[in-house]
Amino acid sequence: MFEDHVPVNDILTGQDVVIVPDSSGSGVRAYDRSDHVFAISSSSSESAVILNDENGADWLAETDSLVRFYDTSQMLERLPSHWFG
């Protein structure tokens, strides 16, 4: 599912979430996505996962939150999650 580093936009127990593979591709992180729909940005690299929202705005996937480029006051919280392989 995450081989192409494609984020998953979904709703789980009433919570809008986006599940994002980390930059290494070996793990994932879940974030509150509010009403946004995210896609992977062509600007992503091995050291940084960057997402585009439905309006074309870039967001950086950081450890604790998604942070919008050019307006770092806009952040979406990372959600607690446990993944088993």
Image (cartoon, grey):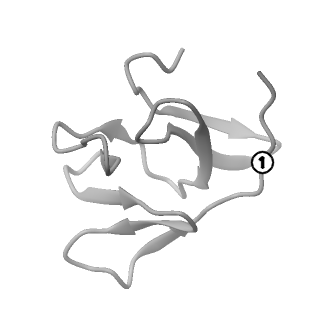
Task: Say what secondary structure mark 1 lies in.
Answer: loop
Mark 1: amino acid: Ser
Q: Is residue 16 above or below residue 24?
A: below
Judge left or right: residue 14 versus residue 42: right
Judge left or right: residue 80 versus residue 77: right
**Residue 66 in the image: x percent, y percent?**
45, 63
Asked whether residue 53 appears in the rendered view, the answer is no
Label 1 crowd (10 A; few <14 / some 14-19 / many >=20): few
Q: Which residue does the image show at 40% across and 27% down from the upper left?
A: 5
Q: Which residue does the image show at 58% across and 68% down from the upper left?
A: 64
Residue 38: quadrant of the picture: top left
Q: Which residue does the image show at 81% across and 42% down from the upper left?
A: 82
Q: Is residue 75 above or below residue 85?
A: below
Quarter of the C terminus within the rendering? top right
Q: Nearer the viewer, residue 66 or 45?
A: 45
Asked whether residue 69 appears in the rendered view, the answer is yes
**Residue 39 in the image: x percent, y percent?**
34, 36
Q: Is residue 26 above or below residue 30?
A: above
Quarter of the N terminus within the rendering? top right
Direction bottom: furthest residue: 73
**Image label count:** 1
Residue 40: quadrant of the picture: top left
Q: Which residue does the image show at 50% across and 21% down from the upper left?
A: 2
Judge left or right: residue 78 versus residue 41: right
Q: Is residue 54 above or below residue 21?
A: below
Q: Which residue is mark 1?
A: 81
**Residue 74 in the image: x percent, y percent?**
39, 77
**Residue 26 in the image: x percent, y percent?**
55, 30
